[in-house]
Image (spheres, rainbow, N blue to C red):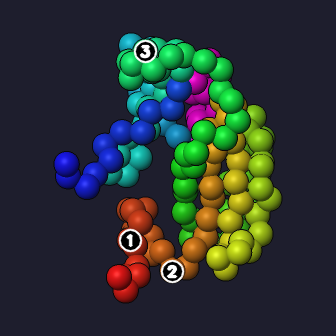
Amino acid sequence: MEQRISLVTLGVADLARAKDFYTALGWRGQEVEETVFYQAGGLALVLWDRGKLAADCGLPAGPPAGFDGIVLAHNVRSDAEVDALLEAAQRAGGTVTSPAAVNPVGFYSGAFTDPDGHAWEVAHNPGFTLAEDGSLVLPDFGG
C-alpha cells in the first residue's frame, strides 16, 4: 500500500445541514448523488449519509456515541487565525470543545466539533511549515 490518503468521508445525519456548516466556513463543494465533495489540498473531504457510509463499509449503523478516536486537523499561519476559525465554526453551528490556548506540546490550538460531532483541531504550530498552497510540510523529527 502506498503511503497516501485520498479521501476522508464524514458520515452525517443531515446532508443539507452539514453542507451549510462547511459552506459557512468558506468551503466550496460539489453535490453529486447525495454526497458533497470538497477538494482539500491533495485529498478530498466527502460528506455522506452516516447510515449509507456504514453499510458501504459493511458496518452496523448506529448513533454517534461520543469520541470516535478521529480528529481532523487544520493548521493555520497565526494564533489570530486559530481564534478566527474557532469563532467562525461556532457562528456556523459548531461547538467549540477546547478554547484556543497554548497546549501542553507548546503551540497554540483549539478544537471544535461540526454539527455531526466530528472533531477538528485548529492549530498554529510554527514547527510545521505551511507551503504557499496550504500543504503541510512535516519537519525532520530526527528519527
- Mark 3–mark 1 Cα distance, whole angstroms, equals 35 Å
Q: Label 3 neighbourhood size at 10 Å, few (<14), some (14-19), many (20+)?
A: few
Q: Nearer the viewer, mark 3 or mark 1?
A: 3
Q: 7 or 63, which is in the foreground? A: 63
Q: Residue at x 53, y 26 (%)?
A: 11
Figure disc tally: 3
Q: What label sits on residue 55 in the rendered view?
A: 3
Magenta-span inclusion, residue 122:
no
37 with respect to 71 (left or right): left
- Give the quarter of the image for residue 7: top left
Residue 107 lies, in percent from the top left, at: 65, 76
Tags 3 and 1 touching, CB below 8 Å = no
Q: Amino acid at mark 2?
A: Gly
Asked if residue 136 shows in the view, the reply is yes
Magenta-span inclusion, residue 16:
yes
Of the residues under marks 3 and 1, which one precedes in the sequence? Answer: 3
Asked if residue 31 shows in the view, the reply is no
Quarter placement of the C terminus: bottom left
- Give the quarter of the image for residue 137: bottom left
Against 136, is 44 above or below?
above
Which segment is the magenta one?
12-26
Q: Residue at x 54, y 16 (%)?
A: 61
Of the residues under marks 3 and 2, which one precedes in the sequence? Answer: 3
Q: Amino acid at mark 1?
A: Val
Q: Amino acid at mark 3?
A: Ala
Of the residues under marks 2 and 1, which one precedes in the sequence? Answer: 2
Residue occupied by mark 2: 127
Residue occupied by mark 1: 137
Residue 3 lies, in percent from the top left, at: 25, 55
